[in-house]
Image (tube, rainbow, N blue to C red):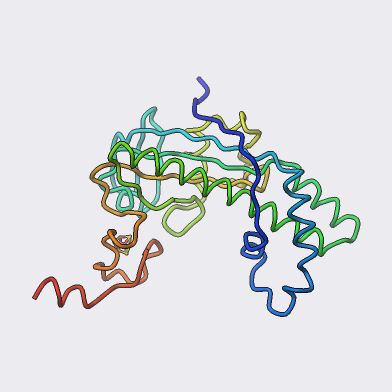
Amino acid sequence: MPPTGTIRRVDAELEPDDVWRCLGPAGGARDRLAGDIEWAISEAVSLAEPASATRALRVQTMGRGEVTFDGGISARGRMLPHLMEGAEGGVFLLATAGPGIGVRVSELFAADRPVEAIVLDAAGSAIAMNVQSRTVTEIADARKEVGDLIGPCLVPGNEYWDLEGQRAVFDALPAHRIGVRLLDSLQMDPQKTQSALVPFGAELHILDDPASSPCSRCKATRCPMRLEPYAAAWETENLS
Ligand code: SF4
């Protein structure tokens, strides 16, 4: 049986700073590229078909390097059981800008217009990230209303959850309903798509809020999920 989930079509929203974040440091080029950025925003917004798919699943088991959810969906990663400690479940999500921007970027490269292609590519990435962040905010608001705590957004392809995690996301969600598919390479098509898992639960341990997460009291200084620096002063104040 194909997986179910909530599908939302959303409007594309983009500010120049969103595009700059995807392009990287601009230095002296910022003023020179201002017109290209405005053009790319308008082009990207008209080509985008932004949409998201979400589905909340309850945690069934947590073992060494593996968390299983309803339906036998399994997420494997050395740190996942720690990052989901105390979680009742997780919301799997996909957020996409749709295929049109990638097609236009390829056309621009083929037409030897690399600057426009690169700026439009960044605008497409910014739209996908924007849809993801709005989706995560909606998930967090809805969960907080029923008394849940929310964990940091976990993304496959990182040190704490390798790219194989994409399989769990696609097992959980009806990706085809927003026109997204997983390639053999574990990359997503359209490329301007984001995937994630948001842990939730009233007893969740690692939180998205740095002020109340235990990271500041944890000595694992090289942890890839550290939300804020280790505050050695905490031990002095609280354990003496
Ligand atoms: S810094 Fe420590 S508490 Fe925070 S996620 Fe890493 S291991 Fe866990």
Determine whether 224 is above or below 204 in the image.
below
Q: Nearer the viewer, residue 49 or 177?
A: 49
* Res. 199 image quadrant: top left
Q: Residue furthest right?
A: 111
Name the image quarter holding residue 58. top left
Q: Quadrant of ligand 1?
A: bottom left
In this rendering, position of residue 42 left or right of residue 15 = right
Residue at image point 44% right, 52% down: 161
Q: Which x, y percent locates residue 202?
A: 25, 42
* The furthest residue to the bottom: 28
Residue visible at 35% across and 44% down?
A: 66
Of 219 and 204, nearer the camera is 204
In the image, taking residue 126 as reference, residue 34 lies left or right, namely right
Residue 237 placement (x, y as % from top left): 15, 75
Residue 62 in the image: state x and y as whole percent: 28, 42
> Extreme left residue here?
240
